[in-house]
Amino acid sequence: MQTVGIGLKAAVGAAVRLLRAHPQAVDGIVAAAMLAVSLIWLRTYPYEPGRRLVYSRQDSQHTDFHPIGLLGYALTVGSCAVLALRRRCPVPMMWASCAMIVLYTGLDYPPTTIAWGPVLIFYTLCTKQPPQRVVPYALAVFVVWLQYSLKLVVLGVLLAVLQTLLVIGVVGVFGNQTRRLAERNERLGQLSEQLRREQAARAREAVASERVRIARELHDVVAHHMSVISVQTGLAGYVLRSDPATAGQSLGTIGDATHEAMREMRRMLAVLRPVPEDGVAEAAYRPSVEPSPGLAQVPRLLERVRAAGVQAELAVTGTPFDLAPGPDLCCYRVVQESLTNVMKHAPGARATVELVYQDHGDIRIRVADDGGRVRSLTEGAVAVPTPLGPAVAGSGNGLVGMRERARIYGGTLQTGPRAAGGFEVVLTLPGEREADPEP
């Protein structure tokens, strides 16, 4: 029995969903049902042609029913058929239904259920239009119903008026509530669509931001190590015959820079590479992820820069303290990019890296050089030939990337030529940040 009940409930639910998906079919079913009830009513209503039906308390007014003929059946079918189009064109169907019922009543045909047609169409109008716009249709229904009640049904005048007003009022209230509910649902759908678009826009912005961050990382990694390789290659070619030891040392530095670049590229790819859902293969699939570089790796960076022919020194002021991973990586990248620019545009220069740890948690980093033998003052946008080989032409994106990093963490970046010659980059990051915006 329970299985039958569940099956019946599922069938009813499927039927309801199907009818909601096809409202015109629902209107056709309603029209057919109304016509069937009207015809059955005409066949079973207990009246005799010519019989007088008193509708007032005074026995002074009466009517004689005429036998329903072809015209009467045509009006019955027409007044029911218009219900099939009540959603598509409710206003013409309302006037057509009222006209046919008035004609049916005026010809003294026997009572039936066709008077409910205008009421259903009036309900449809109330679901589509505000109350002030359905007043003419309410008056039309009132006239039709009052005439029908007084002409064909045994009712007093006062009772007929009250019945008509009650029917119109109830139908109007329900129709208006349905309209408001539909408007709220439509508004909810619009808000949901707007929310979906905003979420998609935020997702696109997040993707674009991540792409910028990845591009910045790639620029920092590739530009630095390729600059070292370029300088060392030029040096090795320059002293290959005259000083084989120096050439061999340059080749060793090239190998170290290559390995370091490969290691950092693998670390970035390990973060970006998707992990399979299979838990068994996950450990074998996921490569080891090394921590992001920070200020602790600056001495090693300076060794690599010195091997490239730049005399670099490190000066630390104040008591060192640990930074969050994001700001720590920001500081390292700024130092790396600044020294890369020195190698590219001021080979042979003397560079100084100053780390100033302030008591209130701020950190200040200054990277300055004395200009060396040549210097480009266009912030890395011009290639300068050097005795060690051709300098690498800059794209101008290095300083842009450094400024963006500083802005992310609420810091400032100042760059420009020095009065005594050379170039300097000064980064200042505030302390006590609420959140680390980078992973």
Image (cartoon, rainbow, N blue to C red):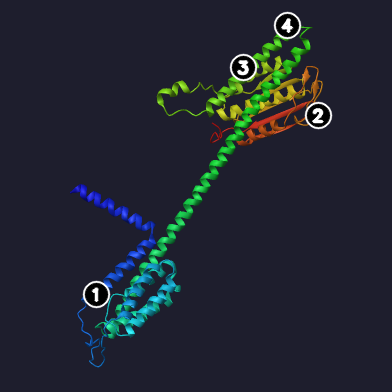
For the C terminus, the quadrant is top right
What residue is drawn where x is 21% and y is 78%?
Answer: 45
Residue located beneath label 2 in the image: 419
> Disc 1 residue type?
Trp
Classify 10 Å Cα crowding around label 3: few (below 14), some (14-19), many (20 and above): few
- Measured Cα–Cα span from mark 2 to mark 4: 38 Å
Residue 208 seen in render: yes
> Disc 3 residue type?
His
Mark 1 or 3: the one toward you: 1
Between discs 2 and 1, the one toward the N terminus:
1
| 348 sits left or right of 200 in the view | right
Q: State the SS at label 1.
A: helix
Residue located beneath label 1 in the image: 41
Residue located beneath label 3 in the image: 259
Residue located beneath label 4 in the image: 245
Vertical placement of 359 versus 68: above or below?
above
Q: State the SS at label 3.
A: helix
